[in-house]
Image: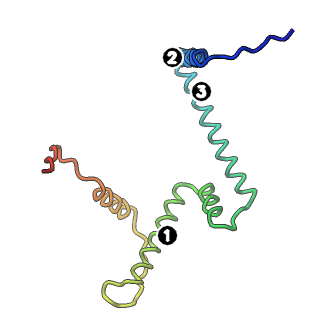
Amino acid sequence: MPRQRTEKTDDQIAAEKRRRADARRLKRTQETFEQRAQWLAKDRESKRARKQQATDQLRDARIVSDREAKRAYRAAEETPEARAERVTKERLAQRKRREAETPEDGSKGVQKTVKPSEPALRQRKRQKRMRREPPNTGRPSKPHK
């Protein structure tokens, strides 16, 4: 004769959840550094595999007709360095178009775009960061009145 299932109360379910959580915590405190490193590496590998699978799906499907798919395909394919270079080129092109639309001296000439050197890019980033965050002077600011 099969055993009949009994309905659990919310208190019983909560107690089971607490027991499982306590067991998980205890197991985690007892595991060695090597074990932790091993499961972290395994987790990282599975994330990498999922990302690779997404890349492969995009590559297999060859979905490049609409703009969003193209963007996703490019993001999955390109390296961070290539992305940084592409973004820099796009921003320079935008700036060039803006300057062509509204030149400062009133003339309609388009200047040749010069790719900034690495130190110039770093300096520009630093200046932008300084504009965003106020410098820490070490003194407390005056309260507003």
The amino acid type, in three-letter code, at marker 2 is: Thr
Q: Which residue is mark 1?
A: 90
Residue marked by disc 3:
38
Q: Position of residue 34 (x, y in %)?
A: 55, 22
- Quadrant housing the N terminus: top right
- Between 89 and 115, the residue placed more toward the observer is 89
* Left-right relation of 114 to 45: left
Nearest the viewer among 32 and 1 is 1
Pointer 1 and pointer 2: residues touching (CB < 8 Å)?
A: no
Q: Mark 2 vs mark 3: give the one in front.
A: 2
Of labels 1 and 3, earlier in sequence is 3
Mark 3 or mark 2, which is nearer the start of the sequence? 2
* Residue 74, image quadrant: bottom right
Q: Circle 2 is placed at which residue position?
A: 29
Classed neighbour count for the residue bearing mark 2: other residues with Cα under 10 Å, few (<14), some (14–19), many (≥20): few
* 3D distance between C-alphas at marks 1 and 3: 42 Å
Q: Amino acid at mark 1?
A: Glu
Who's the residue at 45% across and 74% down the image? 94
Q: Residue furthest right?
A: 1
